Amino acid sequence: MQIYLNGRFSSRDEATVSVNDRGFLFGDGIYEVIRVVNGRLFRLEAHLKRMDRGIQKLEIPFSDKQRDELPGIMEKLVAENRLQSGEGTIYLQITRGAALPRTHAYPPAETPPTVMVMASPFVPDTDILEKGGHAITVPDIRWSRCDLKTVNLLPNVMAAQEEKKRGAGGVLMVRDGFITEGYKNNAIAVFGGTLWTYPDSPYILAGITRDVVFEIAEEEGIPVKLMPVSDEEIRTADEVMLTGTITDIQPVVSIDGHKIGTGHPGPITRLLQKGLRHRMDTE
Ligand code: PDD
């Protein structure tokens, strides 16, 4: 597999990063995951826009020139890794680069950021998309800048491990009694035909897949309320779903053993799944 690292294309095994890299030492960097469908990068501009915001908020010295090179790099990787047909993902990570001595504050601005891009095949989990998952809740122990897509993912990693240990299919994180999102996806509940989801804030990542859901909802005349749903209330929802680049729209059919709706994926979830699939296949 060919990857891109700091201006060079090489095999994944050859590419190495310095032990002084601030991504390695401090988790000081951001990332994006972009869906590739039949060689096309789904909603690339939206991902790059979110990346720009992260770079700006974290003051990572990533130049406009470097930014403008990214789409070309991604397209080359898609071609070289034979992803022109079928499903794949692009992973992009930009860290604040390698600097010595190890100091917490940002190093001199001339320190070049580390830029890594890789393209991999992807197999959607069709079983869970069809049948839905039995989700669990866990405390949301993350920080208060979840709106930045940083590589500081230990709480997300721990939530995923809990899901695996308990044989669950989906995790809902709970902060102050309210469902925020999943560890790699956003959460949406349906009450009486209206979508409810946590408002954009420092406590969630504003997902690009969720934006697509908002678009479909608007087209279909489904109202959307950007309002938190409590841990208790969500159990009484008609439908619950998780949305994300590598999640698509996954129905949630139970939460902590409580059946959601009929215990099967509901009609609004199915409609949104269809709308997302159509957009991924045709855009
Ligand atoms: N995760 N919330 C969190 C915490 C996420 O990490 C993600 C994405 C999302 C959904 O965002 P989007 O629809 O833009 O993918 C929400 C990526 C895919 C990951 O960590 O692999």
Image (tube, helix red, strand yellow):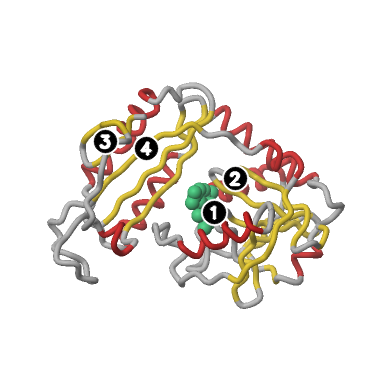
Q: Quadrant of residue 275?
A: top right
Element under disc 3: loop
* 116 lies above or below 197: above
Mark 2 belongs to which amino acid?
Thr
| Disc with the residue nearer the chain's start (2 vs 1) | 1
Dot 1 alpha-carbon crowd within 10 angstroms: few under 14, some 14 to 19, many 20 or more: many
Q: How many marks?
A: 4
- Residue at image position (38%, 46%) is 48
Element under disc 2: loop
Examine the rendering and report whether any part of residue 108 can be seen.
yes
Per the rendering, the mark at residue 14 is 3
| Disc with the residue nearer the chain's start (2 vs 4) | 4
Mark 4 belongs to which amino acid?
Met
Q: Is mark 2 within 8 Å of ligand 1?
A: yes
Asked if marks 2 and 1 touch (Cβ < 8 Å), the reply is yes
* 229 lies above or below 18: below
Mark 3 belongs to which amino acid?
Glu
Residue 16: percent from the left, percent from the top? 25, 43
| Disc with the residue nearer the chain's start (2 vs 3) | 3
Element under disc 1: loop
| Disc with the residue nearer the chain's start (3 vs 1) | 3
Dot 2 alpha-carbon crowd within 10 angstroms: few under 14, some 14 to 19, many 20 or more: some
Q: Which residue is mark 2?
A: 247
- Residue at image position (22%, 51%) is 18
Instruction: Report how far apart the C-alphas of labels 2 and 1 lie in the structure.
Output: 8 Å
Asked if marks 2 and 4 touch (Cβ < 8 Å), the reply is no
Per the rendering, the mark at residue 184 is 1
Q: Quadrant of the N terminus?
A: top left
Residue 205: percent from the left, percent from the top? 50, 59
Q: Residue 31 vs residue 160: left or right? A: left
Instruction: Report how far apart the C-alphas of labels 2 and 4 lie in the structure.
Output: 19 Å
Q: Is mark 1 within 8 Å of ligand 1?
A: yes
